[in-house]
Image (cartoon, rainbow, N blue to C red):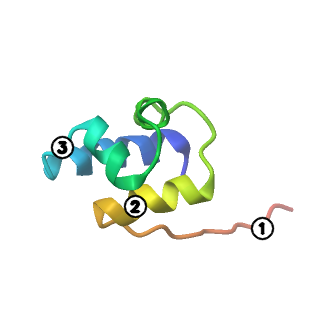
Amino acid sequence: MLVEQFGETIKQRRKELNITQPHLAELAKVSTNTLYKLERGQGNPSLDVLNKLAEVLGLELTLSIKKIY
């Protein structure tokens, strides 16, 4: 999933749960600045950060691998 898509998914789910950005950042133990960037589709988040956010929001990360010839 592209960073832009993940950021939009995080934002939508956060709003569904009525959680503010600062509160989500606190719950996931990530910086508020990192969350702001992710929701705007910016940055290069680590898998650890993505996993923490997904866990708090009740989302599941999946991996898709495609062969390139």
Which residue is found at the position 29% from the left and 37% from the top? 21
Of helix, strand and loop, which one carries label 3?
Answer: helix
Mark 2–mark 1 CB contact (< 8 Å): no
Tell me if label 3 and label 2 are in contact, CB under 8 Å. Answer: no
Label 2 sits on residue? 54
Which residue occupies the foreground of this view, 22 or 43? 22
Kindly identify the amino acid type of the residue bearing the numbered disc 3: Lys
Q: CA distance from mark 3 to mark 1?
A: 36 Å
Residue type marked 2: Ala
9 sits to left or right of 2: left
Q: Secondary structure at mark 2?
A: helix
How many dots with numbers? 3
Q: Amino acid at mark 1?
A: Lys
**What percent of the width, then of the height, locates residue 16?**
15, 50
Q: Secondary structure at mark 1?
A: loop
Q: Earlier in the sequence, mark 3 or mark 1?
A: 3
- Left or right, 5 with respect to 23, comes to right
The image shows residue 35 at horizontal and vertical percentages of 43, 37
Which sits in the foreground, 54 or 67?
54
Residue 28 falls in image quadrant: bottom left
**In terms of depth relative to the viewer, which is nearer, 53 or 28?**
28
Q: Nearer the viewer, mark 2 or mark 1?
A: 2
**Crowdedness near tag 3: few (<14), some (14–19) or many (≥20) residues, C-alpha within 10 Å:** few
Classify 10 as above or below 57: above
Q: CA distance from mark 2 to mark 1?
A: 26 Å
For the point 51% across and 70% down, the residue is: 62
Residue 32 position (above or below residue 51): above
Residue in the image at 24% along x and 47% along y: 14
On residue 15, the disc is 3
Q: Is residue 53 left or right of residue 3?
A: left
Reading the image, the residue beneath label 1 is 67
